[in-house]
Image (cartoon, rainbow, N blue to C red):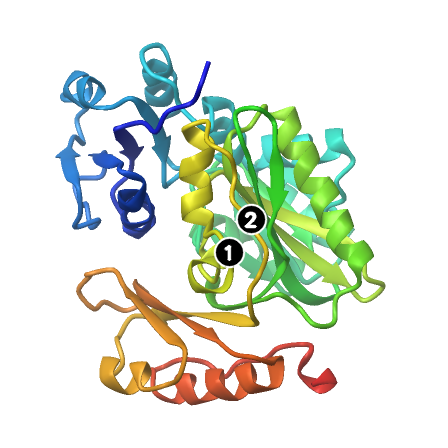
Amino acid sequence: MQSVIAHNIGILGAGQLGRMLALAGYPLGNRFTFLDTTGNPSAGIGEVIVDPDNQHLAAFLEKVDVVTYEFEHLPVQLVRDIEQHKPVYPGSRAIEVCQNRVEEKALFDHLGIPTPAYRIVESAEQLEAAARELGCPVVAKSVTEGYDGKGQAVLKQPEQAADAWRDIGHRQLIVEAFVDFVREVSIIAVRGRDGEVVFYPMAENQHVDGILRYSVAPLPDIDASVQQTADRYIRSLLDELDYVGVLALELFQARDGSLLANEMAPRVHNSGHWTMNGAVTSQFENHLRAVQGLPLGSPQAIAPTCMVNVIGQEGDSAALLALSNTHLHRYDKTERAGRKLAHLNIVADTHAELLEKVRTCQALLPGAPPVAWSFESTL
């Protein structure tokens, strides 16, 4: 049966990722209907059904041909209910796994994807014992509901366990040993309905206070075998979950070059925003191609690119856009501390030129941290 472009795509969630999906889909002739379960939509595009009390699901389903999502913190039962009526990609199993760090770690273990040493604890006393066993520092994370650094605490001493347990406020935590890593990286891949998979070049990511600030790709100093290892890890996840769409896998690269999985995200991902201007086909377009059963586009990078997140306060747009080959993507949000307001994609001919342009950009953004790439010394 020949695939056709779906006329109306339903998106669960109505934030900036949904906004960028819609912007990528309009040239394909798509229309978009968002189902917002938070009561606080910010997409500012397409048709938005605000439904925090689950009263308008039938109206949403009548309008759409296929459903995807931009945010994995959704009621799993809601996604299962939708699957009874319309195709949903990725499926509910992916959301179920990614919402629960214990299930996620179990899946990594099952597939032979290495992770930092970890323990599961259900009391402050168990947390203290795990900290002693793993050796401090350790990071304690809520099993559910944590993202962008929320629901986490770093223990520098086991005696901090009681305070950390109280501050996180969850009945079950996962405790991870710290990794002596060189850098944080991520791999993004997309799998079509027919099982075709394409892999984007790995990106290096810099986080501050648990929030991504910079992503750069492709990397000039990464061995081909490391990219192949990351490709193999994410391919095993895609196939195991019979996944359709974009999947992101965050990793730590250790000093010996090995990779340890941190977490995965079943959606288009912040560390893939560079693809909007730095790759042949963006992650957003490829996600839409996948869920509609269309051929996947090339993930090849066209030039060294850095994504710069704009957090809390926007800079001078005119000054930023005066930088050559710099692209501003605003989310139409009001300023608020810690809020993702926009991102910039900076493209350059060489990594050395890119680094200088990013430093110039950073100086124009209020509160932006200095960029600290691990490959800087090799330029």
Amino acid type at mark 2: Ser
Label 1 crowding class (10 Å Cα cut-off): few <14, some 14-19, many 20+? some
- Quadrant for residue 364, please give it: bottom left
Q: Return the residue at label 2.
A: 298
Residue 280's disc number: 1
Amino acid type at mark 1: Val
Figure quadrant of the C terminus: bottom right
| Count of numbered labels shown in the rendering | 2
Residue 315 lies, in percent from the top left, at 27, 81
Residue 222 lies, in percent from the top left, at 75, 66
Q: Mark 1 and 2 residues: CB-CB less than 8 Å, in contact?
A: yes
Position of 257 relative to 199 (above/below): below
Residue at 65% across, 27% down: 239
Disc 2 element: loop
Q: Nearer the viewer, residue 232 or 146?
A: 232
Q: Nearer the viewer, residue 249 or 168?
A: 249
Position of 339 relative to 131 (above/below): below
Residue 116 in view, yes or no: no
Position of 138 relative to 194 (above/below): below
